Image: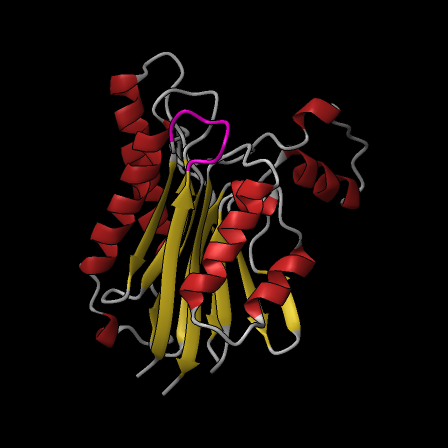
Amino acid sequence: MTQLRSAALTDIGRVRRRNEDRMVLNEKLALFGVADGVGGLPGGAEAAELALLKVTEAISLVDKAKITPGEPLDMVTIVQNASNAVFELGRKISPNSGIASTLTVATIIGRQMVLGHVGDSRCYTQRGDSFSALTTDHSVENEIRLRRAQGEDVYFHESNRHALTRCIGQPGAIEVDVIRRTLQARDRYLFCTDGVTGLVSDAELSAFLTRDEDPEPVLREIISLAIRRGGHDNATGVLLYIDSVA
């Protein structure tokens, strides 16, 4: 059985009047992640909360003991159903513009983590000396870079570089990134919103994640650093330590 420790923290920051970030830390379900209500639209907090609620409900109905490598968890459908629920809520509370959220959430099944990702919240991993982002931001800038790499001659306006190209709550069957990763003892995973990543560098995050401390004080320092540097957005993180894998 996988042994783990975890912590979750959020801060409204110094600018926003409302915290529209949400997080999930459910060790019983082995479910961890964050959601960030999209700014500029009404109902961001409601979108983030509903997205995580629907994922949690879906995971609670999964009998992980019966999942085999040949029949992996259908994270795409779980996330798409959450997105559809947010879209329907948006039709009720904001029929003109809808509501939306990012979603970066993972569950553990045996020795494997299955992660679903839409938007620009992130999941980082520290394994030994190696630090990397498991997720890729679904932003205008990243989409243009991909299309350029494929030979297209396309451009974007600087003011739109961070605009989302995918989000929970948009109409239709949303494309979901799914990452599957075999866990190892001493792995560390940080799920966080852009209120953290916009103010704390990858090098700094790596240094935090290599510290030999419990996750709660480490995460508290990460969030506090983002707030000290301006706190222009809500800052939220979930930190997961894998102590052993059986």
Quadrant, the C terminus: bottom left
| Membership of 15 in magenta stretch | yes
The residue at the point 58 percent across, 72 percent down is: 210
User: In the rendered view, would you say 127 is above or below 138?
Assistant: below
Q: In which quadrant of the rendered view does residue 203 lie?
A: bottom right
Q: In which quadrant of the rendered view does residue 28 lie?
A: bottom left
Q: Which x, y percent locates residue 33? A: 39, 54
Q: Which x, y percent locates residue 174? A: 43, 39
Q: Which x, y percent locates residue 30? A: 30, 66
Q: By what rule are the colours in the image chosen? A: secondary structure
Farthest top residue? Answer: 96
Quadrant, the N terminus: bottom left
Q: Is residue 122 visible?
A: no
| Membership of 241 in magenta stretch | no
Farthest front residue? Answer: 228
Q: How many marks?
A: 0
Dominant secondary structure of the residues highlighted in magenta in the image: loop
Is 21 positioned to the left or the right of 1 in the image? right
Is 71 positioned to the left or the right of 229 in the image? left
User: In the rendered view, would you say 132 is above or below 197?
Assistant: below
Q: Nearer the viewer, residue 245 or 192?
A: 192
Q: Nearer the viewer, residue 171 or 2?
A: 2
Q: Nearer the viewer, residue 118 or 221?
A: 221
The residue at the point 40 percent across, 30 percent down is: 100
The residue at the point 42 percent across, 41 percent down is: 11
Range drawn in magenta? 12-18
Q: Is residue 162 visible?
A: yes
User: In the rendered view, would you say 3 is above or below 204?
Assistant: below
Q: Which x, y percent locates residue 146? A: 71, 44
